[in-house]
Amino acid sequence: MTAVDPLSYSDTKLRGILSTVRTIAMVGASTNASRPSYHVMEYLQGRGYRVIPVNPGTAGKVLLGELVYPSLHDIPDKIDMVDVFRASETVGPVVDDAIAIGARVIWMQLGVRNDEAAVKGEAAGLDVIMDRCPKIELGRLGNGA
């Protein structure tokens, strides 16, 4: 895969991921209610997911009922999916951390694409989705996702 290759994920793959994950760590979650990550977190919680915010700048605060952690390594619970709201060039270390904590999925938000990190994640057995939003995909796929 190269950065110019279009990204295509089957509905079956997306449904499979979204129907099996339960706990999501959101890297780059914002306590600012006008930021997209805030709305995505709120939506996912409303759909029954537990979303744990990760942001070193707001660690220790409570966001939408969940404690904000400074890093993935600090979360005491098992994480199924890591949802990344960070710049594409910063995703490599996030993937390394996701592998280290035993996450099953790396999901990079709209506009976030790092092919090198994706290859590394896939080689470690993770499902990798790039340049997609789980909120949008859940809405598009319907209630059965």
Image (spheres, rainbow, N blue to C red):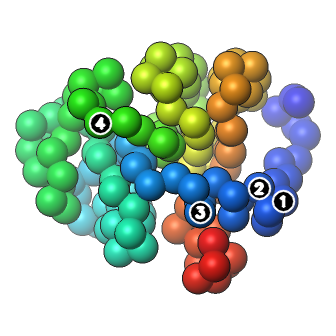
User: Which numbered disc flags the more N-terminal residue, 3 or 2?
Assistant: 2
Exactly how many numbered labels are in the figure?
A: 4
Q: Residue at x 37, y 36 (%)?
A: 78
For discs 3 and 2, the disc positioned in front in the rendered view: 3
Q: x, y percentage for residue 33?
A: 24, 65
Vertical arrangement, residue 124 with respect to residue 70, above or below? above
Q: How far is disc 3 from disc 4 in space, using C-alphas?
A: 19 Å
User: Which numbered disc flags the more N-terminal residue, 1 or 4?
Assistant: 1
Residue, disc 3: 19
Q: How far is disc 3 from disc 2 in space, using C-alphas?
A: 10 Å
- Circles 1, 2 touching at the beta carbon (< 8 Å): yes
- Circles 2, 4 touching at the beta carbon (< 8 Å): no
Residue, disc 4: 77
Kind of residue at badge 2: Lys
User: In which image quadrant can residue 38 be found?
Assistant: bottom left
Residue, disc 2: 13
